[in-house]
Amino acid sequence: MLLNGEKLLKIFQLVCAFCLFFASISFSNDIDEGNERFHKNCHNCHGKAGMGVASYPKVAGLEPEYIIDRLNRYRSGEKIGSNSGLMISMARKLTDREIDILAAYLSNIN
Ligand code: HEC
């Protein structure tokens, strides 16, 4: 049996819906895991949900690329601001996966 254009389109739509569904599940897991990781120790300085406390910067609502870049730079020991020392010792222990989920979580809150 030959597939006509309409059937192909239906199949295509089903495949897309399926992929989007699983993409959204894995994305929300990242956010949940990031939330958990953040509240292990990051919140001690950056406040609950990353809203910032006194001289500790707000980290909620930043772009994911920016967060990943900053965490990688701190992890490599780079000084960015005047208080980088604190952040460098924190970032040193982070894995790539932890940086990804933290970025997913933080970029998703306002
Ligand atoms: C001991 C306190 C402390 C802890 C704990 C801490 N941070 Fe920080 N964080 C800082 C300080 C201070 C800065 C600003 C550093 C500077 O001057 O460069 C900073 C900066 C940042 C920035 C860059 C903000 C910007 O606007 O550029 C991000 C992102 C960040 N922290 C995420 C995290 C994450 C994720 C964790 C948990 C793994 C964490 N921090 C744990 C103190 C802390």
Image (tube, rainbow, N blue to C red):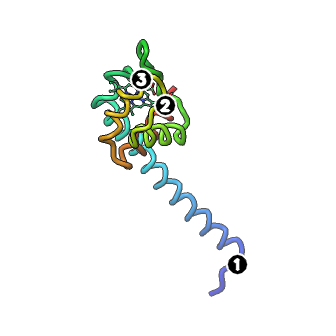
Image coords of residue 104 (percent x, y): 46, 40
43 vs 69: above or below: above
Q: Which residue is mark 1?
A: 4
Image coords of residue 71 (percent x, y): 43, 39
Residue located at (41% from left, 15% from top): 53
Mark 2 neighbour class, 10 Å CA radius: few under 14, some 14 to 19, many 20 or more = few
For marks 2 and 3, give the CA distance: 8 Å
Residue located at (32% from left, 36% from top): 37
The type of residue carrying mark 1 is Asn
For marks 2 and 1, give the CA distance: 59 Å
Image coords of residue 28 (percent x, y): 43, 43
Mark 2 vs ligand 1: CB below 8 Å: yes
Residue located at (45% from left, 40% from top): 73
Q: Which residue is mark 2?
A: 80
Residue closest to the eye, 43 or 82: 82
Q: Which residue is mark 3?
A: 83
Residue located at (37% from left, 38% from top): 34
